[in-house]
Image: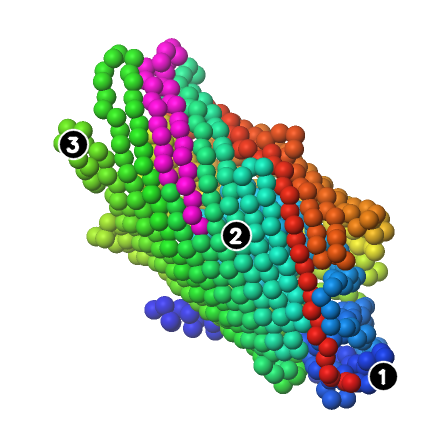
Amino acid sequence: MKIYVFYRLFTVAAITAVVLAPVYGQHAGQLQGVVKDRQTGQVIEGVTASLRESQQRAKSDGNGVFVFDALPFGEYTIQLSSIGYSTRTLNPILISASKRTADLGEVFLDAVQNKLDEVVITPDPPMVEFGADTITFNASQSMMAEGSAASDMLKSVPMVDVDIDGNPTIAGMLNTRIFINGKPADFTAETIADLMNVLPADMIAKVEVVTNPDVRYAADGDGIINIVLKKGIKLGLTGSASVTAGTLNNYNGSTYVAYRGDSLSINTGYGYRYGTRVTTAAVSRRNFSAGEDTPNSFIDQWSADRNHQQGHNLNTSIDWDATSNQNLTVMANVNATNQTSLADMDDYRLNAEGVQREFRTQRNDRGVKGLNYKINAQYTAKLRGKNERLEAGLVAFSNSRQQDRAILREIERANGTEVDPFNQYMGNLIGNNRLEMNIDYRRSVGQWSTVSFGAQGSFASNDNNQSVTVYDYALGMDAVNAALSNRFRYRETIYATYASYQLRTQTRWSFRAGLRAEGTYLTLTERLDEHADIRPYVNFFPNLSINKVVAKKHRFGLSYSMRLMRPREHMLNPLINDTNPANVSFGNPGLRPAFSHRYQLSYGVATKQWSFTPRLSYAATGDLIERFRISADSVTFLNLASRNELTLNLVGSYKQGKNLTLNWGALISRVDYHSPAALVEHRTGWNRRGNIGASFSLPKRISAECRITYTDRMLSQGRRRSTATADFGVRKAFLNNRLLVRLMATDPFTDQNTMEYIDGITASGATYFQENDRVLRTRNYRLGLSYRFMNAGTSKRGL
């Protein structure tokens, strides 16, 4: 049955590709040139020529000649690099109907000596680049990326929010996927936070924020944050080492080494992080009976949590050009984390008159150990030299996680009734495994268009085994709590096919139409004897976009896409967490996926000095998955409501010479929540977000950078009060740019305070009003040191 549906989906995609691909008889354009040594005038063999727009590469032959055939009309940027020579970039290069062949003639490269004494400074790309559906943040241009973790660096990326646990999301979107080098990395909610908190930002080349993903990517998620790791910035050997220490008892250390030859690139990085997080929280809740305006009870809680976390990350990648037409890339990542936390809580229970009837004190001692493995492999082949490309990829992921928690709770009642202390232990063993495979084919059809289609398979499993014991004071021994001890296993299989057609015209119009089909199979098992096969479902996801470039600097775009949000494993998991007796939580295996329709109108203008990109989008989401309080003390996930959101997103940059760069963004959205089942009140409100960042170049090799972010967000059952965060840094370069010393400050004026107001209704019709006031100690001053080196070996080619 599964294979039959897979073949049926693949047939649909293939037929779509054929229908969408008109046949053109003309040939596309050609780009060629001859590479020579500027000093000797001799040709250079084996120079790597790379096209930034299409990611194609070619090698110069024995006569120094390189050639690109069958290039669609448009503008191109070419980069030439070889061991022993400075890299050279040429742009713009135009290929059109009136100029089908772009002959660069003789292109000269400058020889460099073998040296370790100085880091050579080359022209830098802008910190932020804007495309029709993508914003690119070049991490190497940000001081905040040096000696920090990925979660810290991502706070500088336009349109990206990072929560206090280190999870990044695209501002204005409900569900964001995290990719590394174009492959999924967010297989579980816990492991992506672990990875982002320890992955060295020194290894990151750029971050791509994709607001309208192509159909070749899974339909799950409104947008993608793709983290692209470095591959060696120059031919030869490069590397860096960084250490950072902060006043919050936090330390970072990382090393990165890359070797890049004519056909082989090897990159290895290691990161270590130790940090302490101190949080205090106050919760005040008033409970109301159905239809009543007077509270029937009150709950007040105060808590303090001190969390210690250390992590290790090792990442290695190999990029090999087996021939001029074949490439193999393999990346392996290992991430280990170890957390311990100690939390104390005072819990006051009051009756309707506000008189205390019960007081509880509780101490939670928690430990988490996790280990993740991930391997990516991708093979790329250029076929017959007609811009025809075949790609095959594989991703294997494995995660093991052990959670231990001990609770000691003592209760005092106003009536004097004695209650034995509550002493509980919980152990949870979690395993996650996933295998993904894909095959993609793309080729030019005539001089104007490109067609692509492919197939993908994803096979995932999740196993949670929870054991809970409670000390029985009457028996004087631990007893198994059968109500809380459970095992939950989850299997997910997804088959997908897609087809896409792109057309570019000589008048700078571009069109893209794509269709993706996904078939999903789920199996849930609880307590070994309860088995449920969810009925398979098949969905189709169209994607359409139109773009127009005017006068080379104005870009207009219009797009539509259909996306979905599948319930993640922690949302489905029915295992009960009773750490907080006023907030007992568990998942819901009956959740349905939420589907959304997104429309976006964009405009972008860019000059050498400034850029401005406004985007107006509308998203309609049904069966939205959110937390819901089903009783006074119990919380779960439900397909809660429909959500419509109209968003205006503004992003811009300004550059004053080489000394000042400004990047800024603003978001305002109108949100409408509506529940057909009346589980939440119909409510509307506004979300607001703003950020500004500046970098300065000062005399004596001193540079400075700052950023400020403001957020104010509406919730489905309340509102989160506005918050602001700030980061400042200054850097001084020594030893011919090899040694960098940084002094940075995070939230120097105040700690991060999050206030939420929740006005909700329970499944029984009872209502409540709750205020959550959480303070995270974020005021931190850090000192960092980085050492960089480059060894460009002398090539014998062309001498």
Secondary-structure class at tag 1: loop
**Who's the residue at 30% across and 24% down the image?**
410
Q: Which one is in front, 146 or 297?
A: 146
Q: Is tag 2's residue or tag 1's residue first in the polypeptide sequence?
A: 1
**The disc labelled 2 sits on which kind of residue?**
Tyr
> Which numbered circle lies on residue 272?
2
Badges 3 and 1: C-beta atoms under 8 Å apart?
no
Residue 341 belongs to magenta span: yes
Per the picture, the main secondary structure of the magenta-coloured stretch is strand
Q: Secondary structure at mark 3?
A: loop
Question: Percent x, y for residue 133?
Answer: 66, 56
| Stretch in magenta | 337-366
Residue at image position (72%, 86%) is 61
Measured Cα–Cα span from mark 3 to mark 1? 91 Å
Relative side of 596 to 347, left or right: right
Residue 398 rendering spot, x and y as whole percentages: 40, 60
Sequence order check: which comes first, mark 3 or mark 1? 1
Instruction: Measure the C-alpha gap from mark 3 to mark 2.
Output: 44 Å
User: Which residue is most to the bottom?
Assistant: 62
Please name the residue that numbered disc 3 is placed on.
476
- Crowding at dot 1, Cα within 10 Å, few <14 / some 14-19 / many 20+, comes out as some
Identified by mark 1, the residue type is: Gly
Which residue is tagged 1?
Answer: 41
Residue at (31% x, 30% y) in the render: 408
Residue 293 seen anywhere in this rendered image of the structure? yes
Q: Are marks 3 and 2 in contact (CB under 8 Å)?
A: no
Based on the picture, tell me whether residue 239 belongs to the magenta stretch.
no
Give left or right: position of 555 versus 325.
right
Residue 92 versus residue 674 in the image, above or below: below
- Badge 2 crowding class, 10 Å Cα cut-off, few under 14, some 14 to 19, many 20 or more, is many
